[in-house]
Image (tube, coloured by chain):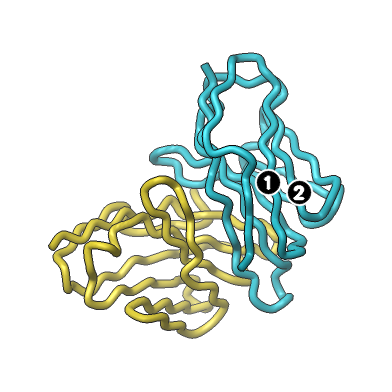
Chain colours: A cyan, B yellow
Amino acid sequence: DVKVTQSSRYLVKRTGEKVFLECVQDMDHENMFWYRQDPGLGLRLIYFSYDVKMKEKGDIPEGYSVSREKKERFSLILESASTNQTSMYLCASSLYPGQGDTEAFFGQGTRLTVV
Amino acid sequence: KNEVEQSPQNLTAQEGEFITINCSYSVGISALHWLQQHPGGGIVSLFMLSSGKKKHGRLIATINIQEKHSSLHITASHPRDSAVYICAAYLLTDKLIFGTGTRLQVFP
């Protein structure tokens, strides 16, 4: 079974703190994604990575950065957390399109509250 | 305008009804996913398809590439089908983007 594991299920951080959200997958997938999910807005892509040390901005990258030093790990970083970053964060991974089944697999989500 | 649009946003049904959820996209894609999200946030992939039709139990997914449209059907719906159903498109740029979801409630 593919496993995408996010480091925390729930996090509470203070405004201005640096926050790290970690995601690890064990299926040797090239593509990894970070989304946030907010009521009425659905899942919005923050950043994605198609290879080690490679990253692409998604639709809402402002206030976030990412790191992919190893293929299996994709980290989302909030340099200075703000209350408008309170959200559910979801990580996903998949193979490249064209590599056969590009089914996407998701972590369990991290509910981040910034106070 | 979102590149992936879903309808309806909310759907209620009586147990046993046939349900259809629609997904339209406006850009080139390499694959389309149908996902299910239960309360608590966990997302499960139901189907990935790039052409034709797939069936799994009471769930059927179809895609029409020319019309840029996909549908998810649930036959003989059951209260345990209550969830949010999301379509996600794998763009030719390697981005995976999502529709806003359809909240389905099936009542006994």
In this view, B1 is above or below B18: above
- Along the viewing direction, whichever of B9 and A113 lies nearer the viewer: A113
Same chain letter for marks 1 and 2: yes
Q: Which residue is found at the position 17% from the left and 73% from the top? A: B16
- Which residue is labeled 1 in the image? A23
Front residue of this view, candidates A54 and B2: A54
**Dots 1 and 2: beta carbons under 8 Å?**
yes
Label 2 sits on what residue type?
Answer: Arg
- Figure check: A111 above or below B21: above
Residue A9 point in image, percent of width and height: 54, 39
Instruction: Give the residue at mark 2.
Output: A73
Label 1 Cα crowd, 10 Å radius (few <14 / some 14-19 / many 20+): many
Task: Please tell me whether residue B45 is drawn above or below residue B41 in the rendered image.
Answer: below
Q: CA distance from mark 1 to mark 2?
A: 6 Å
**Nearer-N-terminus badge (1/2):** 1
Classify residue A8 as left or right of residue B68.
Answer: right
Q: From the top left corner, tell me how far across and down residue B73 is, in percent.
A: 33, 74
The answer to whether B32 appears left or right of A73 in the picture is: left
Chain of the residue that carries numbered disc 1 in the rendered image: A
Q: Amino acid at mark 1?
A: Cys
Q: Quadrant of the N terminus of chain A?
A: bottom right
Instruction: Tell me where residue B72 sits by quadrant.
Output: bottom left
Check disc 2 and report its element: helix, strand or loop.
Answer: strand
